[in-house]
Image (cartoon, grey):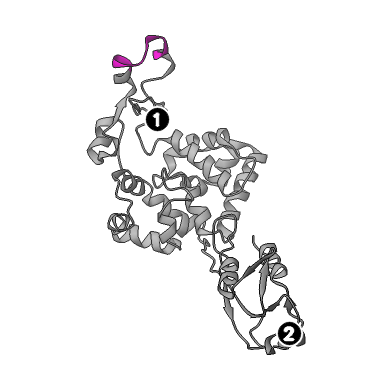
Amino acid sequence: MFNIKRLSDIQKKTSAYNNFFTVKELKERLIPIEFKDEIPDYCKCGGEYIMTSSFTEAQCVDPYCPYKMAYTLSHFIRHMGFKDFGEEKCKTLVLATYDSFQYPSFLCVFSVDENIIFAKLGQADANNFINIRNTLASTPYRFNKSFPALGIPDFGANCKLLDVIKTPKEIVHLLASGKINDFLDQIGMRAPIYKFYLDVFDITITLLYSTYAPLAIKPGKKELYIAITGNVTLNGISMTRTEFLHACSSLKNSDGEQMYELKESKSKSKLSYVIADAPSASEKYEIGKELNILVTADEFVKILKDNID
């Protein structure tokens, strides 16, 4: 665990903060006098406020600042799909229980005794929070939804890490084995800031997938066996068999996941659909007619799209 309250402390840990200055220093050098009182020198937790010389938003230097944790908890709850438990309620709960956290992670709030939760939040909000906690523990969430919800800077839904790592077990293993930095280098995420943030969130990542949302999953693509007979036309455009298969296999859900893996087959026991835009005397057409699984190319694509989450 880091004990960081000054900019010089964090600059000893990583070069990622070499272009930052304390707000106090910037006030003396660059900030116009009329704005100096608008930005405090220190966070309420005691950590220095820092920013770059281009005046990015001021932030507390302490990566484990309870006010930061409250914001991150709010981000997590919102991105996991829960409502009616915003930042102010998160702040109330985190600030009231922070000193009891076993680990430096906002997720520890989910281990707070229910009596304390009710005392700090009141009945309605406490019941909502407890429902959130219980739902997290019992619901199989997708890995590429739950990981970005942790609010790790530069590790959002489109980060390169999620293109390579497909399950929580992989990331937890890399962190536990000390191989995460080498892995980041291999996939081109070499900047020191990436390594620093994963170091800071190491415990949080491990806690999420071991304790608080243990059913996180990365669903595989749905395997479908089909047969194609005759010429294929999709939305009025003539396609080769290969082009059609590629178009269908490329369909993705809202999370950017490829949903289908299509395989051609003549086996009656395996076939789900026979694609035929016109009647024919082919064996495949006869099988589709016999099994009542004949569809046109347009109908088949509509079926696939309708079944995407």
Mark earlier in primary sequence (2, 1): 1
Query: Residue 137 has which mark?
Result: none
State whether residue 163 appears in this view: yes
Q: Which one is nearer the viewer's eye here, 214 or 18?
A: 18
Q: Which mark is residue 59?
A: 1
**Residue wearing tag 2:** 280
Residue 122 x/y as whole percent: 63, 37
Mark 2: which amino acid?
Ser
Query: Which quadrant is home to the N terminus?
Result: top left
Per the rendered image, the range of residues in magenta is: 27-36
Return the residue nearer the eye: 54 or 110. Answer: 54
Residue 255 lies, with reference to residue 245, above or below; the image says above
- Left or right placement of residue 154 versus residue 111 in this view: left
Q: Nearer the viewer, residue 255 or 85?
A: 255
What whole-number distance in Å separates the C-alpha atoms at marks 2 and 1? Answer: 69 Å
Question: How many dots with numbers?
Answer: 2
- Residue 206 visible, this orientation: no
Question: Which residue is at 42% across, 64% downward?
Answer: 169
The quadrant where residue 90 appears: top right
User: Tag 1, which secondary structure?
Assistant: strand
Q: Mark 1 and mark 2 in contact (Cβ < 8 Å)?
A: no
Instruction: Give the percent coordinates (x, y) of residue 184.
Output: 32, 55
| Left or right: 8 in relation to 149 | left
2 vs 1, front mark: 2
Q: Amino acid at mark 1?
A: Gln
Look at the picture and state if 85 lies above or below 234. Answer: above
Magenta-colored stretch includes residue 89: no
Q: Please identify the quarter of the rendering in which residue 182 is found.
A: bottom left
Left or right: 149 in relation to 119? left
Give the residue drawn at x 52%, y 45%: 76
